[in-house]
Amino acid sequence: MAVLEDKVAVVTGASSGIGFATARAFRDEGATVFVTGRRKDALDAAVAELGPGVTGVVCDASVPSELDAFYNTVRDRAGRIDVLVANAGVGTAAPFGEVTEDLIDSLFATNVKGTIFTLQQALPLLSTGASVILTGSTAATRPSLGLEIYAASKAAIRTLARGWALSARTHGFRVNVVSPGSTRTPGLLELVPPEILKQAEGDIPLGRLAEPEEIAALTTFLASDASSYVNGAEFFADGGYAQA
Ligand SMILES: NC(=O)c1ccc[n+]([C@@H]2O[C@H](COP(=O)([O-])OP(=O)(O)OC[C@H]3O[C@@H](n4cnc5c(N)ncnc54)[C@H](OP(=O)(O)O)[C@@H]3O)[C@@H](O)[C@H]2O)c1
């Protein structure tokens, strides 16, 4: 049986990578899915590939007014949100000593401010018992050299989830974090040179990178009623990288 039948889901940052694989998994499980991204051409291509049942809206998660416009579309077309995946995120590397104000502002604008407003602006639409899933990272637990600022932005995600989990009685949602390890996505391949990726595979107990579908499978569990008593937790899909 499809586990997300009749559910309305939102996945931010879904024109590529983990978000795209998540939207596809949700579609396959029967959900009506709304997806976002900043680049219209990339989003249009993703929506064309995902097919009926998936709606794309250009929306920068770091701009609250764009989130408002996006949620107006969701309200008009679906009336509610049962599953919200705040996945939009960016990664930028800089050796410590060369960190700039722009790098900090851009990472925190999307990864932290974007996540906060993605949930806050959605509150009026969340159905009772809605599942909220935030995309964290193993970087928050085991930061790599040069990714300290990105790691700090993802540590904030973990802390936000702990705090928001207390809102369950007030706002009626549950919230959890999915923390991927290195996952074969356009975002990672642009960030990390191939020789470093090869080396990184050696540090992963499973000996390989994750595929985006392996992250989406975990997110699908958290989106479904099978995880109805799970709240405030962090789940790693990292091949054991940050656990050993
Ligand atoms: N891949 C990994 O190894 C890995 C590991 C741990 C955690 N993560 C996290 O997983 C999430 C997805 O990463 P990914 O590797 O799948 O990256 P990706 O392939 O670069 O995809 C990122 C998606 O987010 C969108 N996006 C970026 N900034 C946005 C914004 N401000 N507003 C709306 N959409 C935005 C991008 O489209 P536009 O550029 O068109 O906006 C794209 O669709 C991120 O939160 C990332 O930090 C990834």
Image (cartoon, rainbow, N blue to C red):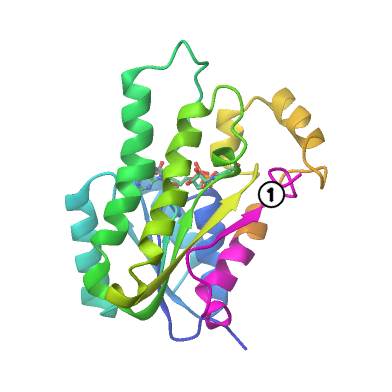
Can the viewer see residue 152?
yes
Residue occupying image coordinates x 27% and y 53%:
117
State the residue in front, 24 or 231. 231
Is residue 98 part of the magenta span, yes or no?
Answer: no
Residue found at the very far bottom of the displayed protein: 1
State the residue in front, 27 or 95. 95
Question: Where does the image place residue 168, in percent across and percent down from the top left?
Answer: 36, 73
* Disc 1 residue type (three-letter): Asp
State the residue in front, 14 or 112. 112
Quadrant occupied by the N terminus: bottom right
Q: Quadrant of residue 141?
A: top right
Question: Where does the image place residue 135, in percent across and percent down from the top left?
Answer: 49, 53
Identify the magenta region: 216-244
Question: Where does the image place residue 227, in percent across and percent down from the top left?
Answer: 56, 77
Quadrant occupied by the C terminus: top right
Q: Is residue 133 left or right of residue 55?
A: right
